[in-house]
């Protein structure tokens, strides 16, 4: 980062996955960062999440990859099967094979463990909790942030990392309701003991034309089993994203599936299952303007069928940092970031919506082999060197786990 941006006051709205990662990167580059988060404190919410190799490279950059490796499971393979007869459709070897092929491994774990790892990369006291953004005002050289509790803050630039129902996006485009995709997911997790003698593969997607079941382990010891069973549903009756699930309805909808899938769903205690609406927006991404940059779901929410939501947020953060290193001022960097991300996000959005990724023989390198630290390197987008980055973190006193998520 050049002297133009060192010491700049950066406000990040949303201390979720993308916000924490970008905040930690900006702090290592000398910016004065405050994250404003609507939640009152860190909470272990959310279910299972995939950390694909393109995402793991970013965790390695921030030196928090060991935390997710200790907490999560490194699946031996990503197995794709016909949902009805169980026939193998495509098997992608992971573990060491992923390291060799994609340059990093693949991990499945609880979203809360990923979130805690990223929070630990931030300087202590960087997050202002209980601050729900109401709106933004552009005042000359400054941006004013207005919060629902009546308070205000000022910054040189703002990063919108406030997820699916982004207020920063709304500040630019007005209110746009996220579109219900016509799909719901029953999500559940429960202890391995409840599975009885069934020993599922580490990570499996069971496919039919209309319905899908994804199953994996949430932890290294394979104690917690997770599934997401997705099905079309014409309407979603509430503004809330989730509701308690009717497990009888779920089992009925998947009654024609392979016996192993029926067994996984039958073993789930009713209290352990919730039903989620899947939302998306059109591929009209909103990257922001010269003082506001949007990343992650605020910029480009997408259906979860490639499990790339968190990965795209971390790729965004990394490419934005590279653009800042190349440009020297925020406005030019934001323009480079938007230009660089459009093509990849469009393709991931398209393939996610089609829900075809890995249904049969697949070339997954374009997704998992992508290196956000060095892809398309140029003078305006220099590559990031993890070693130089670690030295910088040591100099700035920002060691991983220096700020325990609290
Ligand atoms: C509580 C929660 C649970 C999730 N669980 C899963 C899961 O189990 N599996 C999965 O694959 N994906 C899950 N996701 C989605 C996934 O984490 C994101 O799609 C992905 O990580 C993209 O990250 P992001 O940084 O864009 O947004 P997020 O990680 O969603 O972070 C957005 C942050 O902004 C905050 N925020 C929103 N509005 C405001 C506002 N007005 N003012 C201040 N702060 C605001 C939110 O509280 C949140 O912390 C979950 C998201 C959330 C918020």
Image (cartoon, helix red, strand yellow):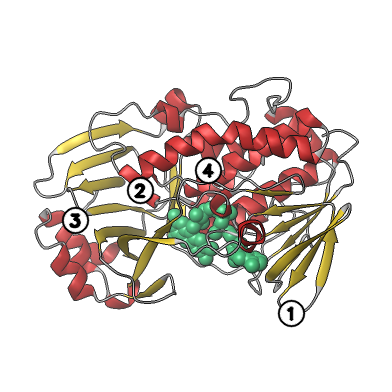
- Tell me which label, 3 or 4, sits earlier in the chain: 3
Residue 402 position, x and y percent, is 74, 54
How far is mark 4 from mark 2, CA to CA? Answer: 13 Å
Q: Which residue is drawn at 30% across and 61% down?
A: 182
Instruction: Name the foreground residue: 373 vs 48.
Output: 373
Q: How many marks?
A: 4
User: Label 1, on which residue?
Assistant: 149
Q: Residue 198 carries which label?
A: 3
User: Label 2, on which residue?
Assistant: 305
Camera-side mark, 2 or 1: 1
Crowd rating for badge 3 (residues with CA inside 10 Å; few <14, some 14–19, many 20+): few
How far is mark 1 from mark 4, CA to CA? Answer: 31 Å
Residue 234, by quadrant, is bottom left
Mark 3 falls on what kind of element? loop
Crowd rating for badge 1 (residues with CA inside 10 Å; few <14, some 14–19, many 20+): few
Q: Do the residues labelled 3 and 4 touch (CB within 8 Å)?
A: no
Camera-side mark, 3 or 2: 2
Residue 386 position, x and y percent, is 68, 30
How far is mark 2 from mark 1, CA to CA? Answer: 37 Å
């Amino acid at each position: 980062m050049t002297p133009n941006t060192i010491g700049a006051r950066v406000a990040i709205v949303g201390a979720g996955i993308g916000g924490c990662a970008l905040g930690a990167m900006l702090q290592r580059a000398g910016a004065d960062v405050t994250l404003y988060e609507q939640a009152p404190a860190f909470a272990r919410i959310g279910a299972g999440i995939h950390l694909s190799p393109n995402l793991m490279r970013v965790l390695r950059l921030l030196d928090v990859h060991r935390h997710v490796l200790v907490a999560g499971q490194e699946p031996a393979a990503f197995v794709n099967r016909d949902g009805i007869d169980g026939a193998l459709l495509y098997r992608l070897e992971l573990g060491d094979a992923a390291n060799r092929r994609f340059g990093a491994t693949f991990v499945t774990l609880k979203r809360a463990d990923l979130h805690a790892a990223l929070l630990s990369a931030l300087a202590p006291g960087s997050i202002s909790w209980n601050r729900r953004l109401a709106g933004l005002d552009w005042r000359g050289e400054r941006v004013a942030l207005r919060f629902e509790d009546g308070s205000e803050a000022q910054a040189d630039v703002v990063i919108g990392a406030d997820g699916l129902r982004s207020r920063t996006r709304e500040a630019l485009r007005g209110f746009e309701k996220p579109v219900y995709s016509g799909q719901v997911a029953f999500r559940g997790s429960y202890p391995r003991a409840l599975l009885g003698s069934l020993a599922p593969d580490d990570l499996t997607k069971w496919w039919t034309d209309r319905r899908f079941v994804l199953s994996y382990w949430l932890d290294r010891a394979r104690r917690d089993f997770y599934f997401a069973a997705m099905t079309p549903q014409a309407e979603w009756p509430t503004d809330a994203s989730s509701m308690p699930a009717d497990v009888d309805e779920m089992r009925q909808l998947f009654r024609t599936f392979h016996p192993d899938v029926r067994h996984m769903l039958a073993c789930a205690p009713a209290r352990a299952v919730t039903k989620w609406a899947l939302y998306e927006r059109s591929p009209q991404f909103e990257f922001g303007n010269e003082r506001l940059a949007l990343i992650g779901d605020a910029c480009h929410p997408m259906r979860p069928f490639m499990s790339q939501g968190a990965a795209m947020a971390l790729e965004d953060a990394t490419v934005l940092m590279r653009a800042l290193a190349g440009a020297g001022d925020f406005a030019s960097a934001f323009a480079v970031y938007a230009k660089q991300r459009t093509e990849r996000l469009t393709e991931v959005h398209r393939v996610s919506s089609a829900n075809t990724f890995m249904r049969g023989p697949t070339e997954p390198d374009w997704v998992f082999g992508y290196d956000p630290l060095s892809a398309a390197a140029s003078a305006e987008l220099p590559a990031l060197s993890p070693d130089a980055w670690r030295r910088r973190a040591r100099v700035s006193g920002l060691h991983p786990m220096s700020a325990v998520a609290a």
